[in-house]
Image (cartoon, rainbow, N blue to C red):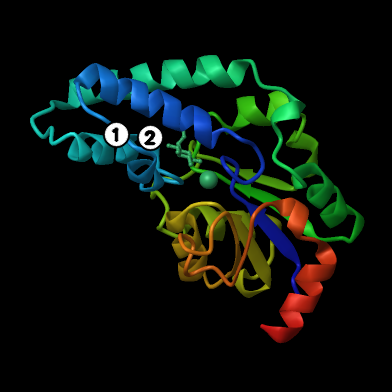
Amino acid sequence: AIQACLFDLDGVLVDTAKYHYQAWKRLAGELGFEFTEKDNERLKGVSRDASLQILLEVGGISDVKEEQRQQLAERKNSWYVESISRMDASELLPGALEFLKECRANGIRTALGSASKNAPLILANTGLAPYFDAIVDGTLTSRAKPDPEVFLLGAAKLGVQPGACVVFEDAEAGIEAAVRAGMRSVGIGSPAVLTQADVVVPSLAAFSVAKLREWQVTA
Ligand code: BG6
Ligand code: MG
C-alpha cells in the first residue's frame, strides 16, 4: 500500500515556477539574448547552478569564469527572493492545501523533496510547513534531479520504502528522479511533457487519496 507522498515544491504546491522563469528571463535579457518558455522547461526542477549552466548554453555563452557564474546566479536569486518575499497562501496552487490535509487525515506520511534553497522561506510565507513530516530541500542534497537523491532521502527520513512512495512533480527531471528512485509518480501539468509519469493531472485539485488508492490497485 502507498504509505507516503513526496512533493516537489515549485510548480506543484506553489506557483513559483513563474517567478523563477521571470528572473532567468531578466538575466538572459541583461546578457543580451531571448529566453523562451520552451527553453524554461529544461530549468524546471534543476538546481540553481545547473540552471545557470543551461541558460548560458541557450545564449551560446561559454567563457564564463566561476566567480562570474556565482555573481550571475546570485543576481537571479536576488530578484527571485524579492518576488517570493511577497508571497502568501493565496499563491498556493489549486488543491495543494486540500490534498496535504487529506493525506494527514488518512495517515499518509508527507515529505517535501525540493531542489530549492529558498524552500523554508516559501513554506513559512504560505503556511505549509506544518503539513510535512519531513523536509528535504536544496541545502540537504548534493546531486540535482534527475538524480534520485532528494526523494530517497525523503523516504529514508520518513522510514518508508521507496516502493510505497508516490512523487508529485511538475518537471521532467523530477519525474525521472522518481522513476530512478523506484517510486510511483504523478505529473502535474501536461502529459505531452511529463511522458514518464504514471499519471498526469492538471493540478492537485484533480487528485485525491481515493484516486491514490484506486490507482495503486491497477498499477
Ligand atoms: C526547483 C525549481 O524547485 O528549485 C528550479 O524548479 C530552481 O527552477 C531550483 O532552479 C533551485 O531553486 P533555488 O530557490 O535554490 O534557486
Ligand atoms: Mg517543480
Instruction: Indicate the amino acid at tag 2.
Output: Arg
Residue name at image x 31 percent, y 22 percent: 27
- Quarter of the rendering containing residue 108: bottom right
Q: Is residue 47 above or below residue 165?
A: above
Confirm or reject: label 2 Cβ below 8 Å from ligand 1. yes
Q: Which label number is shown at residue 48?
A: 2
Indicate left or right for 211 with 59 as reference: right
**Crowding near pointer 2: few (<14 within 10 Å), some, many (20+)?**
many
Is 19 or 106 nearer to us in this picture? 19
- Quadrant holding the C terminus: bottom right
Q: Circles 1 and 2: CB distance less than 8 Å?
A: yes
- The residue carrying mark 1 is 52
Q: Is residue 140 positioned above or below 179 on the image?
A: above
**The residue positioned farthest toward the left in the image shown:** 63
The picture places residue 186, in percent across and down from the top left corner, at 62, 63
Residue 118: % across, % down: 54, 28
Which residue does the image show at 51% across and 52% down from the upper left? Answer: 150
